[in-house]
Amino acid sequence: MGAPRVRKVVYAVGARPNFVKVAPVVEALAGASGIRGTIVHTGQHYDDALSRDVLDDLGFPAPDHFLGVGSGTHAEQTGKVLIAFERVLVDEQPDLVVVAGDVNSTLACALAAVKLGIPVAHIESGLRSRDWAMPEEINRVLTDRVSALLFTHSPEAAENLVLEGVDRGRIHYVGNTMIDSLRRFEAAARRRAAWRSLGLDEGSYVLTTLHRPSNVDDPARLHALVDALIALGRRTPVVFPVHPRTRARLESTGDLRRLESAAVECLEPLGYLDFLSLETAAGAILTDSGGIQEEAAALGVGCYTFRKNTERPVTVTLGTNRLIGDDPAAISTVRVAPRLSGPCLIPLWDGRAGERIADVLVESLRLPSALAPAAAPSAEPTPAPLRSSGVGRAEG
Ligand code: UD1
C-alpha cells in the first residue's frame, strides 16, 4: 500500500480583515501531516498599509500566488478575482478552498472553486445584517450558500443558517479566529503603547474608523459626519486612521483640511499591531467596521457602532457594543469610559478557534463525504423582515 495522498488546501485572502481571520487557521494547520497549504492573495487590498504591513505584523507566510486584481467596481473586482483564481485552481487542483469573511474576494474565490467542483470552507459563516444595501451581506449569503463547511463564531450565526435551510451537519460552531489573532498579539500591541507617541494618555481618547460607502461616499453626509467629529474633538481627543477610500472622499470635498485643523488626529491606515495598540487603550471606539465591533467587545472597550444594524448582535448582547444608528447627531453620545475588566463573556472567543477549525478540516479531508457539494436547502428560506429596527435587523 502506498503512502496516503497529500491533501492540498488553498487559503484565499484578499483584504485586510481576511488576513487577521485566516492567519490562525494557517498556523494551526501548518503542522498537520499529509496536508499542504497554499496561499493565494487576490490583491484586492494592495497598499502596503492595508496589505503588507498587516501581513508582516501577523507573521503571515508569504503568498504563493498574488493575483494583483486591485480596485474597481464590484463587478470588475469580483470578475477579475473569479478569472484569475480559477486559473490558480486549475493549476493547483486543491482538495479544499478556505475563504473568510464577506469581502468581494471571499465570494469570488468561493464561486470559482465550487464551479470547479472544489469544496469550500467558510470562516465567519452565518452573519446576517438583513441589509441588502450592504455588498458584504450579498457576499455572506452567497458564500454560505455554496460552502460545504460553515464555521460560525456565535450561536445566532448557526440559527441564521438553519433558517435558510442549511444542513446542520455542515455547521461547525468553533469561535472567532479574529479574536485568536487579538489574543496572540494583545501583549505585544500594549507594549508598543502607540497612544504615547501621539501624546495621549490611556483611556483618554476616542479611536474612530469610518469607511463604509454608505457613510463616506455621499458628500453631504460626509460633511455632516465631519462636523460631528469636529464637535466630538472639542471635548475629547479623536484619533482617526483614515482608510484610502475615505481619504479620497475627504480630500475631494475639502473636509480633510477641516478635520486636520480641528482637534482630530488624522493618520494613515495603521498596521495590525499599531491599530490593536490604540484599541487596547482607547476610552471608546466609534466605527462602522464589522470586525472592530468584535475586537472592542473582546477587549472590554466601549464601542459605538455608526450603523443602523449589525450582523454581529452578540457584541451587543454579551459585549460592549451599542448601535447608535447612522445619524451624525448620534456621535454626540460618544463618551470615554474605563475599559471593562474580566474575561470576555462571549463563548468560544477564547483564542482557540483556529485549532478547532484545523481539527474539523483534518477530519473532513480524511472523510471526503464531509465535503460533498452543498445540497439544495432542506427548507424554504425564511424571508427577512422588511422593516424592523435594532440588532441584526435592517431598518427601512
Ligand atoms: C473592503 C471590503 C469591506 C471591508 C474593507 C476592509 C468589499 C465589498 N468591501 O472595503 O467589507 O470592511 O475592505 O478594509 O469587499 N484602496 C486603496 N488601496 C488599497 C485598497 C483599496 O487605495 O489597497 C481604495 C481604492 O480607492 C478603492 C477603495 O479603496 O477603490 C475601495 O477598496 P475596495 O477593496 O473596493 O473596498 P474597501 O472599501 O477597502
Image: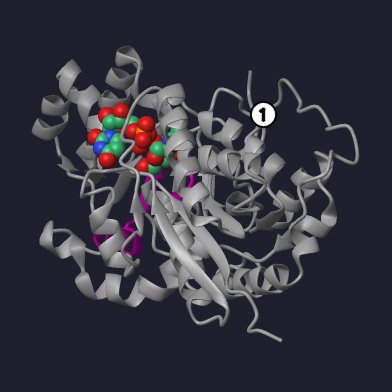
Is residue 75 shown left or right of residue 358?
A: left
| Residue at (83, 55) in percent of width and height | 168
Q: Give, as a three-letter code, the residue at label 1.
A: Ser
Q: Quadrant of residue 327?
A: top left
User: Alpha-carbon neighbours of circle 1 within 10 Å: few (<14), some, or many (≥20)?
Assistant: some
State yes or no: residue 282 in magenta.
yes
Disc 1 target residue: 389
Q: Does residue 336 sit above or below 146 in this rendering?
A: below
| In this rendering, position of residue 150 left or right of residue 322 | right
- The outermost residue toward the front is 1
Residue 327 visible from this viewpoint: no
Q: Quadrant of residue 384?
A: top right
Q: Position of residue 232 (x, y in %)?
A: 28, 36
Residue 390, above or below 50 = above
Looking at the image, the residue that sits furthest to the right is 379
Give the magenta-colored segment's residue range: 272-292
Q: Which is nearer the eye, 105 or 384?
A: 105
- Percent of width and height locating residue 247: 21, 31
Closest to the observer, 180 or 339: 180
Q: Residue furthest top?
A: 220
Give x and y (percent) for residue 295: 45, 58
In the displayed structure, 150 sits above or below 231; it is below
| Ligand 1 picture quarter | top left
Quadrant position of the N terminus in the picture: bottom right
Q: Is residue 197 left or right of residue 358?
A: left
Q: Is residue 213 visible?
A: yes
Q: Quadrant of the C terminus?
A: top right
- Quarter of the image holding residue 58? bottom left
**Image coordinates for residue 111, horizontal then vertical, percent:** 59, 38
Identify the secondary structure beneath mark 1. loop
